[in-house]
Image (cartoon, grey):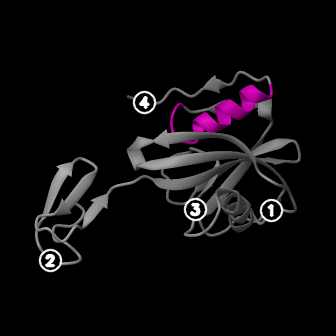
Amino acid sequence: MKEFKFCPICSASLVERTKDRIECGDACGFVHYNNPTPVAAMVVEYEGCIVLAHNRAWQGDFYGLITGFIDHRESPVDCAVREVKEELDLDAATPNLIGVYGFERLNQIIIGYHVEATGTITLNEELDRYKLVPPEACVAWPTGTGFALRDWLRMRGIEPEMLKLPG
């Protein structure tokens, strides 16, 4: 976890105490915890289907949920509404919590919501395509945001097929 080597307060060398904690080698008291980043992930229901989107930065043909980092002093619910507007230009109804999921590979905590949305889909610069999938045809994935989709489908009485990941 060595993101930096010197204390930002006193410039002394930093010491790794655990894999998630580094401290100042002197006694100035600085401690850096590598806490996970909170992310909102939305199962967006639009015209009876789920919106799955492809991010421009992704290679391959994987489509996922709409997601976004929760900003400083922003509630997860406000983030969910904001991200649906920013990424899809849709108006989201009040989000309903699905669950909270650890995503260790990216050191994130994912807060999953279901939102019903209205308007006309217009993708922002982050996304290059989307597809609308009826809930009963959704395939979930066994990592990250896929658990939120799986759990929302189960709440609706649908046992989703789970995507097999390589490896």
Between the residue at mark 2 and the residue at mark 3, the CA separation in whole angstroms equals 31 Å
Identified by mark 3, the residue type is Ile
Q: Secondary structure at mark 3?
A: loop
Q: Residue at x 72, y 34 (%)?
A: 152
Please tell me which residue lies in front, 45 or 10.
10
Residue 119 appears in which quarter of the rendering? bottom right
Structural distance between the alpha carbons of marks 1 and 3: 18 Å
In which quarter of the view is residue 161 placed?
top right
Q: How would you rate the neighbour count of disc 4 (Cα within 10 Å): few for under 14, some for 14-19, many for 20 or more? A: few
The mark closer to the camera, 2 or 3, is: 2
Q: Is residue 113 visible?
A: yes
Q: Is residue 138 visible?
A: no
Membership of 28 in magenta stretch? no
- Percent across and percent down for residue 135 are 78, 34
163 and 26: which is toward the camera: 26
According to the picture, the residue beneath numbered tag 1 turns out to be 90
Q: Which amino acid type corresponds to the residue marked 1 in the rendered image?
A: Leu
Whichever of labels 3 and 4 marks the residue nearer the N terminus, that label is 3
Quadrant housing residue 126: bottom right
Give the numbered dot on residue 166.
4
Comparing marks 4 and 1, which lies closer to the viewer? 1
Residue at mark 4 to residue at mark 1: CA–CA distance: 34 Å
* On-image quarter of the N terminus: bottom left
- Mark 4 and mark 2: Cα distance apart in space: 44 Å
Judged from this view, the residue extending furthest toward the bottom is: 10
Find disc 3 in the rendering and name its residue: 70
Q: Which residues are magenta?
A: 142-156
Asked which secondary structure carries label 4, the reply is: loop
The numbered mark at residue 11 is: 2
Q: Do residues under tags 4 and 2 come within 8 Å of each other at their CB atoms?
A: no
